[in-house]
Amino acid sequence: MSKRKVGLFFGSFNPVHIGHMILANYMATRTELDEVWMVVSPHNPLKKRGSLARDHDRLHLVELAIGDNPNLRISRIEFDLPKPSYTVDTLAVLRDKHPAYEFALIMGSDNLQSFAKWKNHEIILRDYRLMVYRRPGYDDGPFATHPSVSIFDAPLMQLSATYVRNRLKDGESIRYLVPAAVEDELLKSGMYR
């Protein structure tokens, strides 16, 4: 029996917005992936907290954003790993925990360009597929022709979590920038204000 193909979409999702959701859904429905897991990255203890919301608040917002979409799931795997967590280690833990799944890494072409700086990037390229979505202003980089790398022209938005946070801070509308359930929760909780 063939393994279930899962794409891992890592992010701080601070907060999750419709650009994240469009991308996750595209990868889950327009590629050979069976589902996409949105992996919420915890606060890196080596970095200043700054405007990063609490880990569990961001996790809850992603859960709200996913709602009843059967193609998307949330993962808090990195919350339970030593900090800082490196992708290669997270992948090894997921593979051990879920032997029935075949994991692929979803990333933007900006990350592919700096991929040589990742811890044990050779192991990731050897053992996993990289599903790369093009980002404006970045070429595909030196790994684009590697047999483990597939490049996709997914729909992208000029929208950032920083933009959403700034709208909230200034008391402006975030309607349509985030899923409706996320908007409700952000307004109710006063997060990022």
Image (cartoon, rainbow, N blue to C red):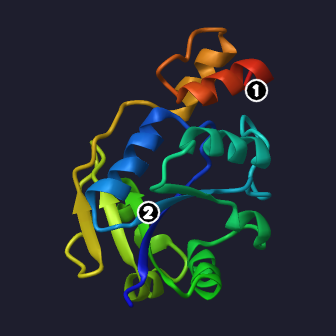
Q: Which residue is mark 2?
A: 35
Q: Say which amino acid is labelled 2.
A: Glu
The residue at the point 25 percent across, 69 percent down is 150
Q: Say which amino acid is labelled 1.
A: Met
Q: Nearer the viewer, residue 107 or 8?
A: 8
Q: Which residue is mark 1?
A: 191
Compared to residue 7, the image places residue 5 above or below, namely: below
Residue 4 can be seen, yes or no = yes
Compared to residue 17, the image places residue 89 above or below, namely: below
Residue 107 sits in which quadrant?
A: bottom left
Q: Element under label 1?
A: loop
In the image, taking residue 47 as reference, residue 102 lies left or right, namely left
In the image, taking residue 24 as reference, residue 192 lies left or right, namely right
- Quarter of the picture holding the C terminus: top right
The residue at the point 60 percent across, 9 percent down is 172
- Quarter of the picture holding the N terminus: bottom left
In the image, taking residue 78 as reference, residue 31 lies left or right, namely left
* Cβ–Cβ under 8 Å for marks 2 and 1: no
The crowd level at tag 2 (other Cα within 10 Å; few <14, some 14-19, many 20+) is: many
Q: Nearer the viewer, residue 74 or 58?
A: 74
Q: Nearer the viewer, residue 88 or 33?
A: 33
Image coordinates for residue 2, horizontal then vertical, percent: 37, 87
The residue at the point 62 percent across, 72 percent down is 86
How many numbered markers are drawn?
A: 2
